[in-house]
Image: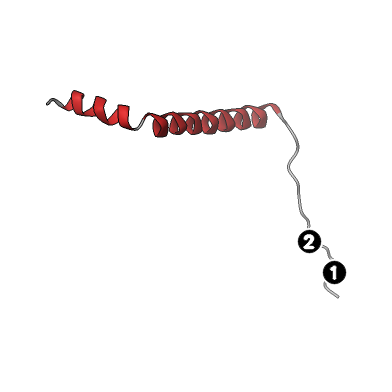
Amino acid sequence: MSIWQEAGEWRRGHEKELFWGLILFLVAVLSFGSGYLYSQSSSRSPIIIEKCSECNQ
């Protein structure tokens, strides 16, 4: 039995797990990609936190 036949048999036995793994991978890639594109399009100024001089009393 060749390695390709063994791989095919393993795939046939794990089709459901492979399907859900592929769905999970696609959702993760789409989420990362959409977040990356959104962050590139938003040009907000950064938040600057200053120390309060009156707070040290």
Amino acid at dot 2: Lys
Res 54 → quadrant: bottom right
What residue do we see at 35% from left, 32% from top? 14
Q: Secondary structure at mark 2?
A: loop
Res 50 → quadrant: bottom right
When the figure is inspected, residue 31 is found, relative to residue 46, above or below; the finding is above
Tell me if 29 is positioned left or right of 46 in this view. Answer: left
Name the quarter where the C terminus is drawn: bottom right
What residue do we see at 85% from left, 69% from top? 55
What residue do we see at 39% from left, 31% from top? 18
Camera-side residue of 18 and 9: 9
How many marks do you count on the picture? 2
Tell me if 54 is positioned left or right of 46 in this view. Answer: right
Amino acid at dot 1: Cys
Q: Residue furthest left?
A: 1
The picture places residue 52, in percent across and down from the top left corner, at 83, 63
Tell me if 29 is positioned left or right of 7 in this view. Answer: right
The picture places residue 2, in percent across and down from the top left corner, at 13, 25
Q: Check disc 1: other Cα within 10 Å, few if <14, some if 14-19, many if 20+.
A: few
User: CA gap, disc 2 to disc 1?
Assistant: 8 Å
Res 19 → quadrant: top left
The picture places residue 35, in percent across and down from the top left corner, at 62, 32
The picture places residue 33, in percent across and down from the top left corner, at 57, 28
Camera-side residue of 19 and 52: 19
Name the quarter where the N terminus is drawn: top left
What residue do we see at 41% from left, 31% from top? 16
Tell me if 33 is positioned left or right of 25 in this view. Answer: right
Q: Check disc 2: other Cα within 10 Å, few if <14, some if 14-19, many if 20+.
A: few
**Mark 2–mark 1 CB contact (< 8 Å):** yes
Query: Which residue is disc 1 drawn over?
Result: 55
Query: Which residue is disc 2 drawn over?
Result: 51
Q: Secondary structure at mark 1?
A: loop
